[in-house]
Image: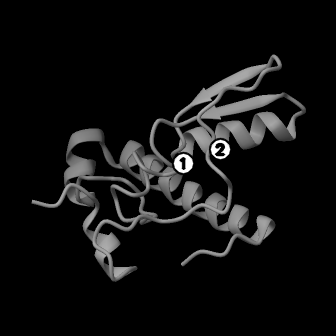
Amino acid sequence: MKEYPYWWDTISDSPAARPQSSAEPSNSLPTSRVDVAVIGGGYTGLSAARQLARAGASVVLLEREWIGWGASSRNGGQVLTGLKLEPAARVHRCGEIRASALFDAASASIERLEGLIAEESIQCG
């Protein structure tokens, strides 16, 4: 049984390999005070830390494993609408207006992510 995301097998000869960060990991907390501690280095935690830092806050991001371990590595780094139900099931459950609004919000989140990737010149696939 493999205890790592299946897609790691596609990026390295070593099945236990994991994506490498260019930043040196740290096992120690900052010695100075910070304004905000963000727990979790997935999409949400990284986004929160980035926004807070851009607004001038002193931020530390705490991740037990490595960046993306509990988030993007578990879904293969895919960017999807995140809507589990098929459109017809969503309409049946929520009504047409609400189902459409949910899909529009999910689509807008993808557009925002694509904009961030372009804005920050993030090298990703």
Name the residue rendered at 53%, 50% in the picture.
67
Q: Specify whether 50 is left or right of 66.
A: right
Estimate the x, y position of residue 77 in percent, counting from the top left: 43, 64
The residue tagged 2 is 47
Circle 2 sits in a helix, a strand or a loop, which is it? Answer: helix
Circle 1 sits in a helix, a strand or a loop, which is it? Answer: helix
Q: Which one is in front, 98 or 12?
A: 12
Name the residue rendered at 46%, 64% in the picture.
79
Estimate the x, y position of residue 29 in percent, counting from the top left: 67, 26
Type of the residue with mark 1:
Tyr
Type of the residue with mark 2:
Ser
Residue lying furthest right in this view?
Answer: 56
- Locate the C terminus and report the quarter of the image it occupies: bottom right
Query: Label 1: few (<14), some or many (≥20) within 10 Å?
Result: some
Estimate the x, y position of residue 65 in percent, counting from the top left: 45, 43
Q: Specify whether 20 is left or right of 85.
A: right
Q: Which one is in front, 114 or 96?
A: 114
Query: Label 2: few (<14), some or many (≥20) within 10 Å?
Result: few
Circle number at residue 43: 1
How many dots with numbers? 2
Picture layout, residue 83 above or below residue 29: below
Q: Specify whether 113 is left or right of 84.
A: right
Name the residue rendered at 26%, 49% in the picture.
90
Toward which corner of the image does residue 73 lie, by quadrant?
bottom left
- Locate the N terminus and report the quarter of the image it occupies: bottom left
Estimate the x, y position of residue 100 in percent, counting from the top left: 42, 52
**CB under 8 Å between callouts 1 and 2?**
yes
Circle number at residue 14: none
